Amino acid sequence: MSDGPTTGDVQGAEGAPATGVSGRPTDIPYREREQSVTLERMPADGEPVYGTEIEPETELFTINMGPHHPATHGVLRLLLTLEGEIVRSVTPIIGYVHTGIEKSCEDQAYWKVIPFVERMDYLSYYFNAQAFCMAVERLLDEEVPPRAQYLRVIHLELNRIASHLFWLGTSALDLGAISILWHALRDREKILDIFEMSSGQRLHPRYFQVGGVVEDIPPGFDQKVRGFLADMPSRIDQYEAILDRNEILLQRLKHVGQVPLEELLSLGVTGPLLRAAGHPWDLRKAMPYSSYDHFEFKIPIGTQGDHYDRYRVRMAEMRESLKIVEQALDGLPEGPYITDNRKVALPPRHELATSMEALIHHFKLVTEGFRVPPGETYVAVESPRGELGCFVVADGSAKPARVHMRDPSFVNLQALRHMAEGGLIADLIAGVAMLDPILGGIDR
Amino acid sequence: MPDATGLELIAAGVRERLGDEAVAGTIYHRGQATLEVAPDAVHDALAYLRDDAEEPFEFLMSVHGCDYFPEEPRLGVHYQLLSMQRLDRLGVRTRVGAEDPQVPSVVDMFSGADFQEREVFDMFGVVFDGHPDHRRILMPEDYEGYPQRRDFPMGGEPVLFTFNENEMPRWYE
């Protein structure tokens, strides 16, 4: 293609730059148009300036990153003010996947709320269910049998590994390593197979019930998990062998995105982000729930609080979770897997044929659900992203009056500004990756 | 968790500092302690509990709202305080009416309350005085109504498709 006749004519006739009067970008010769000329760069006297004649450092411009940007891990929109390559301000704009789950929960019986809350933070569904079930159990003053507690721990920790594996794959993808995604998803698939074995579902399994778990583990579950446990440490070694000596990855992670510990604490940031800054705060140790105090494990912490520490902390957490699963399998107590309070848990199937009482309980639970005495409670568990709190208000009916999730991603997202401002755009990408936000949990 | 006696001691401390009307009551339910304070005393009470109390609660983990319809005053704002030193939690709640609900913002003390207070405003319409960026957060900026209130209908939002767009007045605005 030659220079368009119009452009040539104008320049020939006037002998002046094409954009003199109207200032439209299309007036610029097409070859020069590609140098991303903006109208702001046109001085008042009509002389167009393009290319790099104006130093990029002297002007600010605002762009949208997202909501449909592959590196924002969902539908997160970031309003960036840039000075050249330097990020001067970050404003997260959220709500694009707000589906009103909390409102929908108010219209469901308590046991029907569990599938709803599982869909909030869609990578750590067992944690959401655990937080909600614990809140309702506290309101009911219901004891969970030890076997159910151990089964819950097994699934929670496997879920933590699955969530961290997904984080590892997508974060490495953001930082320019694509193959690690396939490796990480391969191992996550194995965990999903285990979930499928115990509950029939790979995602959103609805395995935890108020008072216990929905079913005992099937035969062969133990061997399957042990096979995974035997496999996984060497897999983590392999991932670290790929990533830990990768110069590109190290350059993008080390000494990047440091936030002072006081700042993190004031922001209410929890989870691996806080531990990477050197604060050993983990609810599993600090306020043990669901027999976490029976297991021996360590809390990995970082020293510098940069992206590299966040990466190392999560890798180490996977190893610790493997230890917990192994101990829980070894010490799995015999006994019931759900409370025998018939007002809360469904009676066993075989009783329905022989006991009128069981039939009535079954009917009442399925049609109406159980009633919870009035009261309100806030229960927190340690999810892969930090403190996941569940606030439940009961008004005495069979439906909760209010269910709220204090989602760690929602609170941690406020730290992004402190991580990214003053850094490069590439560091912002790394920041979002290391923050590990799940937009389903943020928007709910 | 502070036990029922500990909660009364905390309430006595707040009363001593801020006056008798600052504390509206104490709730001890299922091993969880909640201090109910007057709406205008929220900021001062949290500042006292964070800095000057005998057993301080340094961190604010969660702020959330609640609609107690049909009870009055209808709306509640809950603050979940945490002490990492003593491994202790304390709930602080305040109740405001649905007409012109106003609560002082605590963002200047706990910067993490920023998004959470915006969410409470978005969902319940509670106005936080002194919040630096007081806008809706999850719902669209031009949205009318407060969807988490109990009198807001479930499924009150028509879903816009091409086949039913004519039935929705001014959908294109």
Image (cartoon, rainbow, N blue to C red):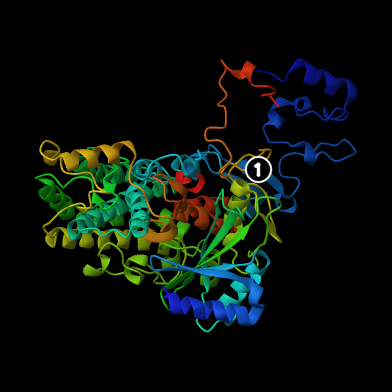
Q: Quadrant of residue A66?
A: top right
Residue at the image position 60 percent from the left and 64 percent from the top: B111
The answer, for residue A242, to whether it is visible in the render is: no
Residue at the image position 57 percent from the left and 31 percent from the top: B157
Q: Is residue A97 above or below residue A292?
A: above
Q: Is residue A300 above or below residue A242?
A: below
Amino acid at dot 1: Ile
Q: Measured from the top left, where is residue A223 in percent x and y?
A: 10, 49
Mark 1 — residue?
A63
Q: Which quadrant is home to the N terminus of chain A?
A: top right
Which chain is indicated by disc 1? A
Q: Is residue A174 left or right of residue A232?
A: right
Q: Is residue B64 left or right of residue A41?
A: left
Find the residue positioned furthest to the bottom: B54
The answer, for residue B170, to whether it is visible in the render is: yes
Observer-nearest of B115 and A142 = A142
Q: Measured from the top left, where is residue A183 in percent x and y?
A: 28, 44
Q: Measured from the top left, where is residue B127 in percent x and y?
A: 68, 54
The secondary structure type at the circle numbered 1 is strand
Q: Measured from the top left, where is residue B138 in percent x and y?
A: 58, 44
Q: Quadrant of residue A271?
A: bottom left
